[in-house]
Image (cartoon, grey):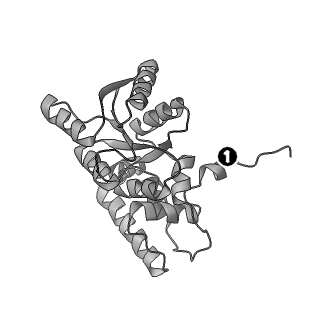
Amino acid sequence: MTRVALIDDHESVRLGLEAACARAGTKKVVFSGSSVDAYLDWRAFSKAPPADVVVLDLTLGDGTTVTENVTRVVRDGSSVIIHSVADRPASVREALAAGAVGVVSKSSPIDDVIAAIRTVARGEVLNNVEWASAVEGDRAFADAQLSGREREVLRLYAAGLPLKVVADRLGIAYSTAKENITRVRMKYVDVGRPAPTKVDLLRRAMEDGILASPSDEAGPTGDG
């Protein structure tokens, strides 16, 4: 049973997600509230373990910032999915840089949110249109000449998996995965394309075709 926390300052949004999680049957909403403070207070009072997945509104009405909200929840031990309107790419990039594993638009069907929770709870990559649109950019860049292993590590890590999960997925030591990411960053610096944050690494991976955007993966459409 996936343990889910919902943090949104609009009660109607939370109620809709609670009902959808209940219908899904394999997801238990352990907390529903309007702020990260309230969630962490609940954790401290109840002594409950961190939620597996926290669905977090991009902007809360309590004066907190995107970075501090995401950082606090991630440090507490949960994976964070941003539930956001689609017209704030700068804030979405900020959330991803702070450690959120992905973003789902509030205009998406509620079943898409449930599917995203399911994907993240399995430790898999959440690579959707909203994520891609937050980091899209030009693609004509100098080749960083990454090795096959470096490309594998970058693909999984930049797409949202924690480095430990990347190491486990590839059957390598955590220290080896970390060394690979360090070399990747250095190689991008060497070709004038620095990637100091995880969002920057995601952008580089998409620019270089290491991680395809959803539109690329969908393939051609039409009558042809």
Q: From the image, which quarter does the N terminus lie in?
A: top left
Query: Is residue 131 something one can see in this rendering?
Result: yes
Residue nearest the observer in this picture, 180 or 207: 207
Amino acid type of disc 1? Ala
Residue at 34%, 43% in the rendered image: 79
Number of numbered discs visible in the structure rendering: 1
Expressed as whole percent of the image width and height from the top left, the position of residue 191 reads 49, 80
- The relative height of residue 221 versus residue 134 in the rendered view (above or below) is above
Left or right position of 140 against 42? right
- The relative height of residue 197 versus residue 112 in the rendered view (above or below) is below
Expressed as whole percent of the image width and height from the top left, the position of residue 122 reads 41, 36
Expressed as whole percent of the image width and height from the top left, the position of residue 78 reads 30, 41
Identify the residue under disc 1.
218
Query: Is residue 1 something one can see in this rendering?
Result: no
Left or right position of 114 against 196? right
Determine the secondary structure under disc 1.
helix
Residue at 44%, 26% in the rendered image: 16
Residue at 44%, 75% in the rendered image: 187
Based on the displayed image, in which of its 4 quarters is residue 15 positioned? top left
Q: How many C-alpha atoms fall within 10 Å of the one at disc 1: few (<14), some, or many (≥20)?
A: few
- The relative height of residue 185 versus residue 92 in the rendered view (above or below) is below
Expressed as whole percent of the image width and height from the top left, the position of residue 93 reads 44, 57
